[in-house]
């Protein structure tokens, strides 16, 4: 009932929005016409007086003209008063016609607008559709939903089930993609508490903390990376951030040793290796080029530019290199080595969904080379994406 009362009020407002300006315009037009007539009659009276003074008409003719013009002037004055609303006099002549037409339009608006609205609602609306509050929308099937809606569903679930470690593990990387690193770090912390610590969770939590801290490796992030390295001494990503922390702390010799150790494990062409060389160049060390097909080290311009780069800018440089390699492989194809180079880089950057897409594309591109395709599958399993 409340809904229909609201509809009725909206219909009345819509009709008034049409009728009030229309009536006002009609009154203004009628008033303007009456005032114009009055001015004409006044001019005619003045003309009669001038003709009488020049002797063009007799006294009797002038009096008769004055009488007729005065009668018309009085009528015009009354019409002006009536149109402006100061005197409710019944309309006559053209004014009566205008008033009749205005009333017809008003009546039509009062009838047509409500009926038209009802007809349109019946034809195109859904009067039997129940309300869909937020809770109902969140419970609807996930297919076709936007990312914010899906995240809201997970958040509501986690609010009701805060001990669901798998839920926190799933939503944490999504928070990172949405630019919410602090929420991601908190979600990873809960997932670690509920599901246990592993290399991936500790590393991703540490990275989220670094991003949230504007690229600075905090003590909490440092501890997370150390736990990850304790579980896997060859893990590249946590070692990269630990070396970065040494650089930020101005522990030059230790930083150089950490960067060189990391570079020694490069197989050739990894995007992160270029960033390592840049970091070493900042510390005054020229790093040797690792052998690798189609791989080039940083240019002199890149090294010089990196001298004043923040850690966030350097991370962006890595992403730019990865994007360039990805675009080239998409356009022109490439060797198995290059596809695996891109896979390793995406693994270091933590872009798991993109990594899965690249694995699928590499398999399709190398389907005619069984040995190369097998190498891609082996690396995919090594990166935790194989079946």
Image (spheres, rainbow, N blue to C red):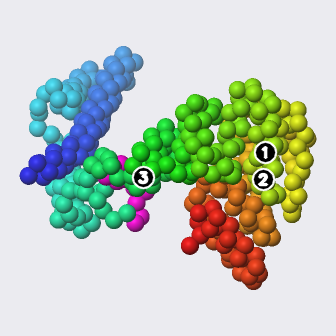
Q: Where does the image place residue 228, in percent across and percent down from the top left?
A: 59, 46
Q: State whether residue 174 appears in this view.
A: yes
Residue at image mark 3: 195
240 to the left or right of 85 = right
- Seen at 40% across and 60% down, the residue is 145
Closer to the chain start, of discs 1 and 3, is: 3
Number of other residues with Cα within 10 Å of mark 1, as a class: few under 14, some 14 to 19, many 20 or more: few
Number of other residues with Cα within 10 Å of mark 2, as a class: few under 14, some 14 to 19, many 20 or more: few
Which secondary structure class fits the magenta region best?
helix
> Who is closer to the viewer here, 151 or 311?
311
Name the element at disc 1.
Answer: helix
Q: State whether residue 112 appears in this view.
A: no
Disc marking residue 261: 1
> Who is closer to the viewer here, 229 or 8?
229
Q: Where does the image place residue 103, in percent across and percent down from the top left?
A: 17, 48
199 to the left or right of 117 = right
> Who is closer to the viewer here, 29 or 280?
280
- Seen at 72% across and 38% down, the residue is 243
Which stretch appears magenta? 143-158
Q: Where does the image place residue 263, in percent across and percent down from the top left?
A: 80, 48
Disc marking residue 265: 2
Membership of 57 in magenta stretch: no
- The image quadrant where one finds the C terminus is bottom right
Q: Where does the image place residue 325, in percent across and percent down from the top left?
A: 77, 59
């Amino acid at each position: 009932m409340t809904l229909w009362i609201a509809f009725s009020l909206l219909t009345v407002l819509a009709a008034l929005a049409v009728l009030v300006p229309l009536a006002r315009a009609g009154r203004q037009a009628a008033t303007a016409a009456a005032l114009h007539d009055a001015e004409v009659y006044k001019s005619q009276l003045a003309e009669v007086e001038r003709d009488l003074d020049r002797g063009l008409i007799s006294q009797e003719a002038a009096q008769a003209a004055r009488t007729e013009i005065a009668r018309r002037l009085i009528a015009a004055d009354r019409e002006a008063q009536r149109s402006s609303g100061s005197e409710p006099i019944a309309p006559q002549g053209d004014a009566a016609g205008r008033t009749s037409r205005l009333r017809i339009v008003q009546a039509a608006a009062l009838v047509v607008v409500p009926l038209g609205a009802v007809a349109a609602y019946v034809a195109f609306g859904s009067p039997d559709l129940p309300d869909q509050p937020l809770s109902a929308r969140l419970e609807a099937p996930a297919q076709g939903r936007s990312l914010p809606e899906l995240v809201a569903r997970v958040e509501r679930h986690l609010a009701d089930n805060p001990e669901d470690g798998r839920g926190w593990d799933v939503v944490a990387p999504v928070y990172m993609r949405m630019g919410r690193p602090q929420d991601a770090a908190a979600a990873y912390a809960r997932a670690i508490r509920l599901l246990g610590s592993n290399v991936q969770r500790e590393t991703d939590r540490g990275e989220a903390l670094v991003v949230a801290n504007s690229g600075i490796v905090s003590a909490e992030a440092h501890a997370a990376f150390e736990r990850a390295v304790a579980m896997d001494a060859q893990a590249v990503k946590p070692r990269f951030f630990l070396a970065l922390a040494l650089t930020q702390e101005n522990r030059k010799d230790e930083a150089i040793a950490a960067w060189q150790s990391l570079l020694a494990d490069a197989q050739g062409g990894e995007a992160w290796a270029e960033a390592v060389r840049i970091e070493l160049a900042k510390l005054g060390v020229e790093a040797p080029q690792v052998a690798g097909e189609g791989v080039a080290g940083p240019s002199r311009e890149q090294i010089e530019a990196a001298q004043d780069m923040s850690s966030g800018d350097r991370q962006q440089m890595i992403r730019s290199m990865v994007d360039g390699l990805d675009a080239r492989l998409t356009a022109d194809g490439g060797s198995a080595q290059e596809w695996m180079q891109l896979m390793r880089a995406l693994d270091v950057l933590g872009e798991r969904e993109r990594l899965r897409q690249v694995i699928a594309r590499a398999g399709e591109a190398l389907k005619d080379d069984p040995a190369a395709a097998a190498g891609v599958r082996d690396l995919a399993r090594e990166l935790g994406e194989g079946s």
